[in-house]
Image: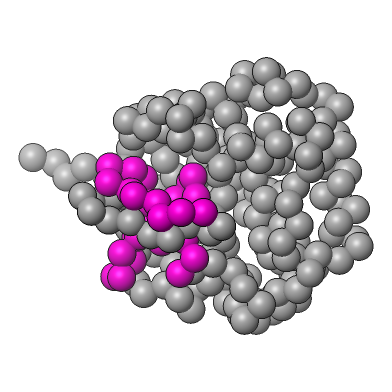
Amino acid sequence: MEIVIALPGVMLGFVEADDVRVAPTGVTLNDEMQRVCERLRSSLTVEAVASLDSIRTVRAMFRAWEMDPARYRPSSEALLRRVVRGKGLYRVSNVVDLNNLGSIETGWPFGNYDRDKISPPVEFRAGNSGEKYERIGKEAWHVDGRPVLADALGPFGSPISDSTRTMITEATRNVLMVIFAPLPADALELERALAEMAARLERYAGARSVRTGILLPAEPAEV
């Protein structure tokens, strides 16, 4: 899916998966999640999370958007802090849980959307005055000046919190996952994260067709 990037300091990785089966997390995926959580919990403290290179660069990305990462915590950092405190990852569904697993492994925010609920064109931009959406499990999210993914119907996601309009449900069949990777990030590392997510969607959610790609900010026009 083409996404126009209108904010600085970020490149987007995406995974499009067709014919997925959204279901409760199975034993094999649950075991993999548990292993990753135990490894991170044994090697990190809550205080050390903020000093990770991936978290520091994500925080810098937020500051470039004039967002205070201490007040509006990136979703990846929030998940990592939860895991290191011993609370583990949420168990929602196989597709949602894969999204969260990838996020704590890389330290980058991931978004997870029902592709059939998205109305292109899509842009990653700052929210406009008065724009808002209903957040998953939370109150309305007012996005004025905040980084958002937006389609023809308005904002639907962000590297902080996503909307109920495009959330993954048991009825979802076609998925879009977005990785918000700070620049300058390692493109090879992003490619590895995308390949891992594609393989996991096939393994754990039965995806029959998976496509990945990396989107870069548009070059400024010469004058």
- Would you place residue 167 above or below residue 51 in this image? below
Q: Quadrant of residue 134?
A: bottom left
Q: Which residues are magenta?
A: 138-165
Left of 34 or right of it: where is 112?
A: left
Q: Nearer the viewer, residue 138 or 153?
A: 138
- Residue 6 in the image, given as x and y percentages of width and height: 29, 48
Q: Looking at the image, is 65 positioned above or below residue 130?
A: above
Residue 85: x %, y % from top left: 76, 30
Seen from the viewer's position, the closer of residues 140 and 81 is 140
Name the side, left or right, on which 45 lies relative to 161.
right
Residue placed most toward the observer, 116 or 78: 78
On-image quarter of the N terminus = bottom left
Q: Residue at x 37, y 32 (%)?
A: 67
* Residue pictured at 28% horizontal, 42% vertical: 145
Q: Is residue 190 left or right of residue 100?
A: left
Residue name at image x 76 percent, y 57 percent: 91
